[in-house]
Image (cartoon, rainbow, N blue to C red):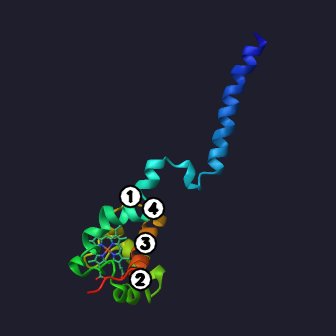
Amino acid sequence: MNRKIIMLLAIPLAIGFSSSQAAENAAKPATKPAANVADRSPEAVVNSKCIECHGTGKAHSPRIGDREEWTKRASKGLDGLVLGATRGHDGMPARGGRPDLTDAEFKAAIFYMFAKSVSEPVKK
Ligand code: HEC
């Protein structure tokens, strides 16, 4: 009888311990659901939304693969680029039309487009 009670007490203790461990690791992506991470990777974010405009340069958006244009825009500093895109301006919707993204996720999507444009430029 006593043993059973000890066992029953041990369960919530064990759960409590593991969830406090989880809280400590909350910043690490491994504790997020796998599907969520996959869907919100920079590439997935860009392909889900940004590409609508940036794939073709619609509405005079900097086209993915236009190294010259991206380099010019990045020359004002990547922080400035991120800030402008977060607020939105001149045909660029705030946060690129993905208000659900965290600052870090949105920034990663911008860096992805920038890096792709610089490393894999497409001829005009
Ligand atoms: C509806 C079309 C549209 C979508 C969708 C869109 N953009 Fe844009 N974006 C634009 C246009 C147009 C500009 C150019 C604005 C300007 O500087 O004149 C732009 C500019 C930018 C810039 C440069 C900002 C600057 O200050 O020079 C960044 C970075 C950017 N977009 C990121 C993104 C990201 C990341 C996404 C997806 C999450 C996204 N955009 C989705 C239209 C779009």
Instruction: Please name the residue that numbered disc 4 is placed on.
Output: 102
Q: Do residues under tags 4 and 3 come within 8 Å of each other at their CB atoms?
A: no
Between the residue at mark 2 and the residue at mark 1, the CA separation in whole angstroms equals 27 Å
Does 105 sit above or below residue 66? above
Instruction: Please name the residue that numbered disc 1 is placed on.
Output: 100
Residue density around tag 3, few if under 14, some if 14–19, many if 20 or more, within 10 Å: some
Q: Helix, strand, or loop for circle 4?
A: loop
Instruction: Please name the residue that numbered disc 2 is placed on.
Output: 118
- Percent x, y of residue 5: 73, 16
- Percent x, y of residue 14: 69, 32
Image mark for residue 1? none
What amino acid is labelled 2 in the image?
A: Val
Look at 46% across and 66% down and name the residue there: 103
Q: Is residue 58 left or right of residue 81?
A: left
What amino acid is labelled 3 in the image?
A: Tyr
- Percent x, y of residue 21: 67, 45
Q: Nearer the viewer, mark 4 or mark 2?
A: 2
- Percent x, y of residue 32: 52, 49
Q: Ligand 1: does it lie within 8 Å of the C-beta at label 3?
A: no
